[in-house]
Amino acid sequence: MDKVLSAIRRFLQLEAASGLILMGAALAALVIANSPLAWLYDGLLSTRLAITVDGAGLDKPLLLWINDGLMAIFFLLVGLEIKRELVSGELSTWNKAALPAIAAVGGVVLPALVYLAVTWNTPEWRDGWAIPAATDIAFALGVLSLLGSRVPAALKIFLLALAIIDDLGAIVIIALFYTANLSLLSLGLAGLGLVALLALRIAGVRSLAPYLLVGIFLWICVLKSGVHATLAGVAVAAFIPADRRGEESEGPLEHLEHALHPWVAYAIMPLFAFANAGVSLAGISFASLAEPLPLGIALGLILGKQVGVMAFAWLATRLRLAALPDGVTWRAFYGVALLTGVGFTMSLFIGTLAFADPAAGVGVRVGVLLGSLVAALAGWAWLRFLPSAGAASLPSPAR
């Protein structure tokens, strides 16, 4: 148990620090995109990089290498985290997973409904319904880290579990709703890659190198297939062995997760934020913020998230399906519900899949940045000025 708690503590600290770096990267992108250096920022991201052999290969601008390539590593880490939590972590039993799982469902459904309500009369924007449905683990935990010991550890663990389930939901949404025209040949080759991963797993292979080599092949095939390439990272994670054997201090899954986590937290995610948060504010007025696309995203994050998480969590306790963490009041819980509206990384990513039009990209980024900022400030302020004793709250019958 001590090892588990220690691992969770290290994870939370790493994610919190990453969240602060994410804030800095996003702010830097905004400043540069609205400065005389904007041409350099745009030119850098549009620079084409190619890897070819005899005329065949990949040729993409730097922005897509980040969004399709580096984010596949991010999704590999997400897949590893989800598998670990399901096998031995906070999602390994129903008692542990019930509250964050049910709350996460509300945190997906309500933001989508809010977004669709706002954009209903503009059908061209409806495809973005999933943009406000995601929670950014690092950013949200970064805000919590500013509050120190005022926030119970149980709430931080709850937020971590909910955000991981959110990521799982986002993966399913991307797979089902955000795919381009499919290439049957590439899908067939990707299927062979999955068979190879399964064969490695059945053969009891514990070395990570074969899994990662097949993973690169799988990523290329998925990239060419029309299914988003980042899903290859999740597929590879599903086959990495999670158990320990003999004198191993950690299993292959834990080893790979620990190796990747600092790179993802301190390099890949900030780089993604820097590449995708830069939006020119020229010509953007309060009237433009009220346009359906940015308004739907912002309200989905600010209102939809907190209402969905609170309503579904409260209903779960009333039906005795789950209970609040020990020592946590509903008032404190509401502060974390506010912070689930910090969408940022995953919201921006889904936005790049939903709309290819650069004009839509501006609205997406404005909506995500505005909604995430308001949710972060509201959650921080609520928890910062909440009496430490915690006022009495709605009863939780399941406790």
Image: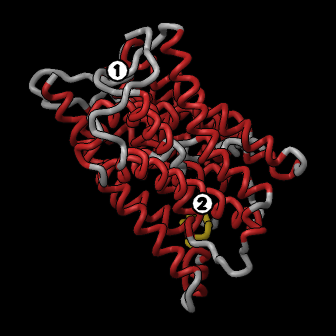
Residues at marks 2 and 1 touching, judged by CB atoms closer than 8 Å? no
Mark positioned earlier in the residue sequence (2 or 1): 1
Q: Is residue 153 left or right of residue 134?
A: left
- Which residue is situated farthest in the left direction here? 247
Mark count: 2
SS label for mark 1:
helix
Q: Quadrant of the C terminus?
A: top left
Q: Is residue 169 visible?
A: yes
Q: Is residue 395 above or below residue 53?
A: above
x, y percent for residue 271: 45, 65
For the residue marked with disc 1, what is the amino acid? Answer: Val
Q: Is residue 235 left or right of residue 161?
A: right
Q: Quadrant of the N terminus?
A: top left
Q: Is residue 218 above or below residue 40?
A: above
**Residue count near mark 1 (Cα–Cα under 10 Å), binned few <14, some 14–19, many ≥20:** some
Q: Which residue is mark 1?
A: 87
Q: Which residue is mark 2?
A: 370
Q: Residue at x 67, y 42 (%)?
A: 130
Q: Residue at x 51, y 79 (%)?
A: 31
Asked whether 317 or 32 is in front, the reply is: 317
For the residue marked with disc 2, what is the amino acid? Answer: Leu
x, y percent for residue 274: 49, 68
Q: Is residue 182 left or right of residue 102?
A: right
Asked whether 382 or 201 is in front, the reply is: 382
